[in-house]
Amino acid sequence: LTAGVATPPLLFPRAFSHVLREAANMTFKFDKLYRLGAWGAAACMVAICALIALQVTFRLVDALLVLVGLSRLGLSITGVSEIASYLLVGATFLGLAYTFVHHAHIRVTLLITRLPPAIRVWFEVFCLIIALAISLMLSYGLIGLARESVQYNDVSSGFVSIPLWIPQLVLATSVGLLCLALAEALFMALRIAIRDPASFREATAPDESEGH
């Protein structure tokens, strides 16, 4: 739950930009949901920065007061580290689907780039199926975990008693959005593989429309 935020978890390959180019009439129909998740992740990041900035400010004020011979104010945010760690969950996972559909996940294609387009497209379909299956299992497990937390009223053991179902629900929602994005990408990849597999292009190939 406390993974780095700068780069989302590298659980799955990045989105397939060639699918979007070849199926020009196909777009991610739930892109607004993915963007909403990204905004949620951004809000969590802003909240973390604000909490830490306030905590540091309170400590600086106390230090300055001591230097001039005055008593401390003693202001602090109770459980700031714990709150920030849970906000980090949202900042890390809510942007998963958005990152996927915008080709931002790191991908190693040293071997499959040497395959003919008609063969490689089926490798892409296979990878998407595996990724979707793993995501669905993870989402199912997280939903079950959140249900148990609600049933037994589980709370965090720190200074602030935060119901554990809240961050768990955020996790489940984030992975659910990723499942939706993977399902859309799989549909588009299958469409190319069945209709015109030879038209499949390299994911890193430049988009001719970008220069216009």
Image (tube, rainbow, N blue to C red):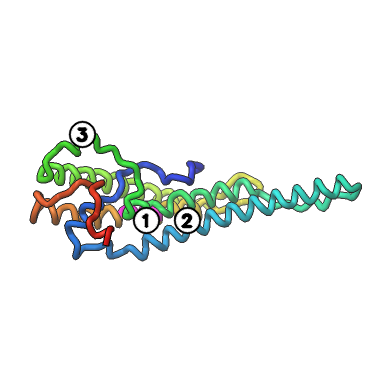
Q: Earlier in the sequence, mark 1 or mark 3?
A: 1
- Badge number at residue 70: none
Find out whether the residues at labels 3 and 2 contact each other: C-beta distance under 8 Å. no
> Can residue 176 be found in the magenta stretch?
yes
x and y, in percent, of residue 130 in the image: 24, 43
* Residue sitting at x 17%, y 57%: 22
Q: What residue is disc 3 on?
A: 111
* Tag nearer the camera, 3 or 2: 3
Q: Residue at x 17, y 42 (%)?
A: 123
Residue 167 percent location from the top left of the image: 49, 52
In this view, the residue in front, 62 or 108, is: 108
Looking at the rendered structure, the secondary structure element under dot 2 is helix
Residue 73 in view, yes or no: yes
Q: Which residue is mark 2?
A: 41
- The image shows residue 123, relative to residue 97, as above or below, that is above
Regarding mark 3 in the picture, which secondary structure is present there?
A: loop
**Amino acid type, residue under disc 3 in the picture:** Leu
Residue placed most toward the observer, 43 or 177: 43
Secondary element at tag 1 = helix
- In the displayed structure, 135 sits above or below 22; it is above
Q: Quadrant of residue 169?
A: bottom left
Whole-percent x, y for residue 149 in the image: 49, 51
Q: Amino acid at mark 1?
A: Tyr
User: Circles 1 and 2: CB distance less than 8 Å?
Assistant: yes
Q: Residue at x 37, y 42 (%)?
A: 10
Q: Which residues are magenta?
A: 174-179
